[in-house]
Image: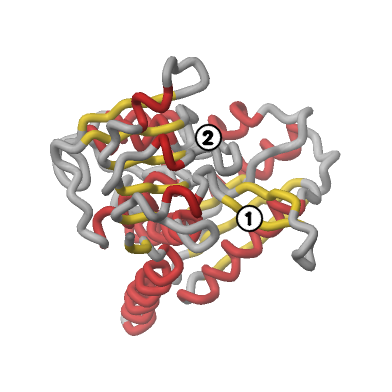
């Protein structure tokens, strides 16, 4: 068993991004600018946004945080989105999810200008991805691709099983890994809550991607020996021995599965580290006009 070290890989890619930013500075160019919009006081969302802002600073990007109270109206949030759409100093922005219940997340996502949608959630970017056209890939699937590519994990002709069919991870990664090219050309099966005899499917997987949000769901008897296991889950579970009272675990029972796997991502320190890096990559692409051209 070998570790797919997302933390180390993220540092490597950040160093590459810093080099690119240094080149922009030398040429007197404008630094990439990422804006994060945070609504409310959700602790997890606050932590995610802090991490994104800190990562921007690490690579030399300009970053801005717009924090609004949970009782902001949907219309007020839409007005912020519209302002950012037209702000030529902003290369990309994200609206951190989840949003308060009175705000329609789908409506907010649709309001974001596709060329600034560095989260890759807008249907325009999703559709371009499905057709193999240039686009901003969703951050977590892009992070998975980076892991596979950088660790030179073969994918052509492999059986890939994806647990979960969300629009954020499961559906896009299934599309990406079935496309022509590398990493891709795989035979992909998507499993979900209505899948019968789930373990029969997972035991066929050369590459198993778990993205269902259930702590330690994947057990040792669900994985074949030598499989590559990508654990996307980040779940808080009670841990009286911890100072915080909880610990982070993935969707995979690491202790049971790791001895069987040829490669496995840890939690924490795996895919999550690459998700933020993918956001930075998309922001740099936007600043360069690589997808939709320069404004």
**Residue 196 figure quarter:** top left
Q: Residue at x 35, y 24 (%)?
A: 200
Tell which of 224 and 116 is nearer to you: 224
User: Badge 2, how many Cα within 10 Å: few under 14, some, many 20+?
Assistant: many
Is the C-beta separation of discs 1 and 2 under 8 Å? Answer: no
CA gap between label 1 and label 2 equals: 15 Å
Q: Residue at x 20, y 58 (%)?
A: 152
Which color scheme does this rendered protein use? secondary structure
Looking at the picture, how far across and down is residue 118, in whole percent?
46, 49
Quadrant of the snapshot with the N terminus: bottom left
In the image, which disc is placed on residue 248? 1
Q: Name the N-terminal-most of marks 1 and 2.
A: 2
Q: Is residue 81 visible?
A: yes
Residue for badge 2: 212
In the image, which disc is placed on residue 237? none
Looking at the picture, how far across and down is residue 44, in whole percent?
70, 52
The residue most toward the right is 71
Is residue 261 toward the left or the right of residue 255 in the image?
left
Tell which of 136 and 149 is nearer to you: 149
Q: Residue at x 49, y 30 (%)?
A: 166
Q: Secondary structure at mark 1?
A: strand
User: Badge 1, how many Cα within 10 Å: few under 14, some, many 20+?
Assistant: some
**Residue 35 figure quarter:** bottom right
Tell which of 75 and 159 is nearer to you: 159
Tell which of 2 and 80 is nearer to you: 2
Is residue 180 toward the left or the right of residue 12 in the image?
left
Where 200 sits versus 169, above or below? above
Is residue 132 toward the left or the right of residue 107 in the image?
left
Looking at the picture, how far across and down is residue 156, in whole percent?
14, 41
Q: Residue at x 41, y 35 (%)?
A: 222
Q: Is residue 293 visible?
A: no
Looking at the picture, how far across and down is residue 63, in whole percent?
57, 66
């Amino acid at each position: 068993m070998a570790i797919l070290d997302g933390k180390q890989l993220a540092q490597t890619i950040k160093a590459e991004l810093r080099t690119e930013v240094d080149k922009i500075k030398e040429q007197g160019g404008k630094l990439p600018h990422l804006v994060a919009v945070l609504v409310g006081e959700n602790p997890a969302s606050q932590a995610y946004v802090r991490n994104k802002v800190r990562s921007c600073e690490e690579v030399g990007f300009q970053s801005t945080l717009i924090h609004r109270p949970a009782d902001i109206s949907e219309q007020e949030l839409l007005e912020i989105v519209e302002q950012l759409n037209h702000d030529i100093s902003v290369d990309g922005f994200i609206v951190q999810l989840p949003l308060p219940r009175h705000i329609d997340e789908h409506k907010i996502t649709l309001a974001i200008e596709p060329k600034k949608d560095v989260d890759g959630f807008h249907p325009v970017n999703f559709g371009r991805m499905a057709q193999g056209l240039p686009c901003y890939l969703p951050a977590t699937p892009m992070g998975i691709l980076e892991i596979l590519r950088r660790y030179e994990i073969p994918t052509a002709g492999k059986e890939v099983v994806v647990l979960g069919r969300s629009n954020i991870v499961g559906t896009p990664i299934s599309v990406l890994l079935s496309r022509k090219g590398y990493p891709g050309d795989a035979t992909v099966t998507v499993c979900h809550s209505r899948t019968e005899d789930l373990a029969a499917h997972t035991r066929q997987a050369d590459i198993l991607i778990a993205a269902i949000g259930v702590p330690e769901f994947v057990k040792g008897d669900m994985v074949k020996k030598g499989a590559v296991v990508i654990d996307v889950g980040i779940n808080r579970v009670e841990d009286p021995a911890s100072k915080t009272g909880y610990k982070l675990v993935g969707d995979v029972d690491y202790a049971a599965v790791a001895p069987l796997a040829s490669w496995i991502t840890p939690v924490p320190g795996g895919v999550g580290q690459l998700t933020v890096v993918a956001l930075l990559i998309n922001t740099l692409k936007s600043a360069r006009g690589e997808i939709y051209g320069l404004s």
